[in-house]
Image (tube, grey):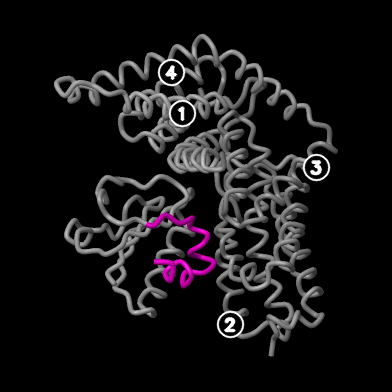
């Protein structure tokens, strides 16, 4: 499955990047194609391109704050999860899909 | 109802995420400028040095944007781009009427709700294009501005004044309680919402000119990773190879003030780790409040030492908290762990 995700936390220096790393590695282990955009204190990094967004089967927002440019994902299937759940058990989040 | 609370929390945290860099640049620049100047009764005297005065002015400019940015992005989180202006103007007015960060929180939430409501008003297709760029910004700003000026501003300012007086005149025992509570909150969920609540209180008070709560928060921030990292170094037999590795990473993260370094330990053994780090951070917070440590940057750990008031006491608080954390957790770990997480 092609999965894209956006991670964001209030301070944007630790949780954002830890969640991104976990989602990518666990997702890959489970056989998914994963790309994660981070919206941390440095702003948007590893930005999702329009082609990647339209090709994705599922969007995951792992965020405790508002996502920037959320309109990009209009019409997609979006799963909202608190970032804490990804850090606690990313496998569980990914099996929910 | 929980969904409403969830929504408010998300808006507030979004506002905080945009607001923190403004506190950082303002607080650090002002601290730098004043650190090199003789301190007068009316504050630091920078009149003798044009360079320091320039730095001071830049820091003040950054501080002056803090409330508009906080309120603006709280509103933005709720209702998107059209809400930014009403939120920012509300935050600005909150500053001028003396309602400070509390008023800015209220203004941001109000602006978000009002714009959200206005967006739902059915409009004829012909006027819809001007709604986003003209009608909604003008109407929402007018409403939020009027509410802040005439209705909400004054009572919130009074409340804030009471809070400020309370903090300025805390007896030593109250100060210790405040430091203990802030410290325990910081450690409790290591970067989660409770941690952020304490962190926001510290940085907001710093924006109001009181660096002491932030001092307690800053020391508490680095105690969990430093304490747990230290524990893995003190007793090698208690910890597995992987945990000792995580311990080294935690030490590094502790030094730069990232509480999250303690998460791997807390996730593996929450019932022993969380109370222990809360205890260590609470002690550090209490020592800071008692000894009048202040922090001028909205961040923690030894890395902010250059902008700390009373750095010796700050380091003492951190090391006491970290050592207590390390000794306690190693003592607790000596007993055999419950069967479900059996160690080798």
Label 3 close to label 2 by CB (< 8 Å) = no
Range drawn in magenta: A79-97
* Residue B9 on the magenta span: no
Asked where in the image residue A2 lies, by quadrant, the reply is bottom left
Give a yes or no on whether discs 4 and 2 share a subunit.
yes
Gap between marks 1 and 3, in whole Å? 32 Å
- The percent coordinates of residue B41 (x first, y second) are 67, 21
- Identify the residue position indicated by label 4 in the image: B144
- Identify the residue position indicated by label 2 in the image: B242
Gap between marks 4 and 2, in whole Å? 54 Å
Q: For the residues carrying marks 4 and 2, which lies nearer the camera in this image?
A: 4
Q: Name the outermost residue toward the bottom.
A: B344
Say which of B202 and A26 sits in front.
Answer: A26
Pointer 3 or 2: first along the chain: 3
Q: For the residues carrying marks 1 and 3, which lies nearer the camera in this image?
A: 1
Q: Is residue A82 left or right of residue B169?
A: left
């Amino acid at each position: 499955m092609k999965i894209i995700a956006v991670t964001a936390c209030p301070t944007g220096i630790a949780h954002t990047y830890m969640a991104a790393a976990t989602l990518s590695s666990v997702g890959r282990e489970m056989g998914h194609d994963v790309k994660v955009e981070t919206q941390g204190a440095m702003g948007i990094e590893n930005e999702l391109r329009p082609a990647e967004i339209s090709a994705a089967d599922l969007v995951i927002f792992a965020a405790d704050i508002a996502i920037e440019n959320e309109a990009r994902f209009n019409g997609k299937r979006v799963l909202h999860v608190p970032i804490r759940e990804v850090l606690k058990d990313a496998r569980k989040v990914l099996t929910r899909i | 109802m929980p969904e409403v609370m969830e929504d408010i929390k998300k808006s507030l945290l979004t506002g905080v995420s945009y607001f923190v860099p403004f506190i950082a640049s303002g607080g650090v620049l002002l601290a730098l400028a004043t650190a090199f100047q003789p301190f007068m009764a009316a504050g630091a005297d920078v009149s003798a040095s044009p360079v320091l005065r320039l730095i001071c002015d830049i820091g003040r400019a950054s501080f002056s944007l803090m409330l508009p940015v906080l309120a603006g992005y709280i509103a933005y989180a709720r209702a998107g781009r059209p809400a930014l202006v009403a939120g920012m103007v509300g935050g600005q007015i909150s500053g001028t009427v003396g309602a400070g960060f509390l008023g800015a929180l209220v203004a941001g939430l109000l602006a978000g709700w009002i714009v959200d409501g206005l967006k739902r008003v059915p409009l004829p297709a012909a006027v819809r294009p001007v709604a986003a760029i003209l009608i909604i910004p003008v109407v929402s700003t007018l409403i939020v501005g009027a509410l802040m000026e005439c209705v909400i501003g004054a009572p919130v300012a009074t409340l804030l004044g009471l809070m400020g007086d309370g903090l300025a005149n805390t007896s030593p025992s109250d100060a210790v309680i405040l430091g203990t509570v802030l410290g325990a909150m910081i450690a409790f969920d290591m970067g989660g919402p409770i941690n952020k609540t304490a962190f926001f209180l510290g940085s907001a008070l710093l924006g109001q000119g009181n660096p002491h709560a932030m001092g307690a928060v800053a020391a508490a921030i680095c105690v969990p990773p430093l304490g747990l990292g230290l524990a893995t170094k003190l007793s090698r037999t208690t910890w597995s190879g992987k945990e000792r590795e995580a311990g080294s990473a935690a030490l590094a993260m502790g030094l730069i003030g990232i509480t999250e370094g303690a998460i791997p330990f807390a996730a593996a053994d929450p019932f022993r780790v969380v109370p222990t780090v809360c205890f260590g951070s609470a002690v550090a917070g209490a020592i800071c409040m008692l000894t009048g440590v202040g922090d001028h940057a909205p961040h923690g750990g030894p890395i902010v030492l250059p902008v700390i008031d009373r750095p010796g006491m700050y380091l003492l608080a951190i090391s006491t908290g970290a050592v207590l954390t390390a000794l306690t957790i190693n003592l607790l770990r000596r007993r055999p762990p419950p069967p479900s997480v059996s160690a080798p």
